[in-house]
């Protein structure tokens, strides 16, 4: 399956930038059965990286225990309107996706 | 057939050249920690075998989760110098759910949605100055979420 769309919002609130990001991904646990009774193979995002103006600020390692279509909120110190936030992910099949936005 | 040493070394160089970009692409992922089937083993793999309980580590999560497929958990560490936060759900088949490393520029805060198979303690581990701290909260689950 091709990587689905991502959505992200970064807003400045009293000196702290809230970054809320949604990734479209099935996050299959490898334990679920399809309607034919066959196990759906393990398929999940393993790494999520957050960058502020090109510099890595959060590196995440995640498991299949994260809900389908993962949503994360991170908080960055300071930041200014227009700062560039990038979020990228890679899953256990090597599929990747990324998105970027400017702090509003 | 005799093995041609020049051809062999060429193959090795090509193989190394092909593999390298993948190694660079794949970021760190704690295979031992995420593969651990008990929280104790996962903690060992994180190097956090004996964490100190801390009141400066805050978990905001429902006491009762109606849907185990999406359990919102918000974590704030007020432990000075926190560099990472890990989340473990004791009774999940693989307890370690996530680990976040923060560099200067990020606050030691995260909100995520996790799956929970059944009622369980949720443990949050923070690392600061080489020490590990823990906070625990039980979340009751009425409908498990490991099938979805």
Image: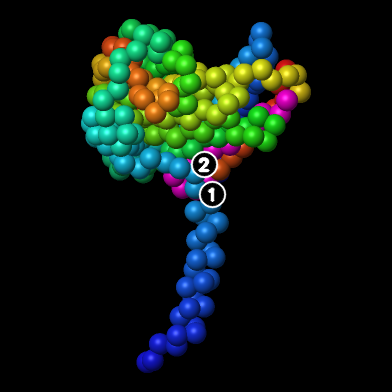
According to the picture, the residue beneath numbered tag 1 turns out to be B25
Residue A47 percent coordinates (x, y)? 49, 37
| A92 in magenta | yes
What residue do we see at 30% from left, 18% from top?
B52
For this view, does A76 lie left or right of residue B49? right
Chain letter of mark 2 equals: A
Q: Secondary structure at mark 1?
A: helix
Front disc: 1 or 2: 1
Assign the C terminus of chain B to one quadrant of the image.
Answer: top left
Chain letter of mark 1 equals: B
The answer as to whether the residues below labels 1 and 2 share one chain is: no
Assign the N terminus of chain B to one quadrant of the image.
Answer: bottom left
Q: Taking A20 as reference, is B32 above or below it? A: below
Point out the stretch of residues depicted in magenta.
A83-95
Q: Are marks 1 and 2 in contact (CB under 8 Å)?
A: yes
According to the picture, the residue beneath numbered tag 2 turns out to be A90
Q: Quadrant of residue B35?
A: top left
Nearer to me, B141 or A38: B141
Q: Secondary structure at mark 2?
A: strand
As drawn, the residue found furthest toward the front would be: B129
Q: Quadrant of residue B117?
A: top left
């Amino acid at each position: 399956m091709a990587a689905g769309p991502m959505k992200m919002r970064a807003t400045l609130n009293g000196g702290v930038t809230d970054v809320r990001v949604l990734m479209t991904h099935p996050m299959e646990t490898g334990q679920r059965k399809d309607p034919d009774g066959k196990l759906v193979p393990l398929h999940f995002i393993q790494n999520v990286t957050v960058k502020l103006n090109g510099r890595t600020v959060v590196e995440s390692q995640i498991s299949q225990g994260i809900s389908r279509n993962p949503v994360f909120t991170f908080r960055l110190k300071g930041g200014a309107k227009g700062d560039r936030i990038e979020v990228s992910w890679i899953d256990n099949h090597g599929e990747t996706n990324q998105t970027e936005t400017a702090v509003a | 057939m005799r093995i041609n040493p020049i051809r062999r070394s060429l193959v090795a160089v090509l193989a190394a050249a092909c593999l390298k970009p993948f190694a660079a692409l794949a970021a760190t992922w704690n295979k031992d920690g995420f593969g651990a089937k008990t929280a104790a083993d996962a903690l060992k793999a994180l190097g956090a075998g004996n964490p100190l309980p801390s009141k400066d580590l805050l978990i905001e999560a429902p006491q009762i989760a109606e849907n185990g497929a999406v359990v919102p958990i918000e974590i704030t560490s007020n432990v000075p110098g926190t560099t990472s936060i890990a989340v473990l759900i004791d009774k999940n088949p693989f307890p370690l759910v996530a680990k976040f490393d923060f560099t200067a520029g990020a606050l030691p805060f995260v909100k995520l949605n996790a799956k929970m198979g059944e009622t369980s303690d949720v443990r949050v581990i923070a690392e600061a100055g080489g020490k590990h701290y823990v906070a625990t909260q039980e979340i009751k689950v009425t409908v498990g979420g490991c099938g979805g």
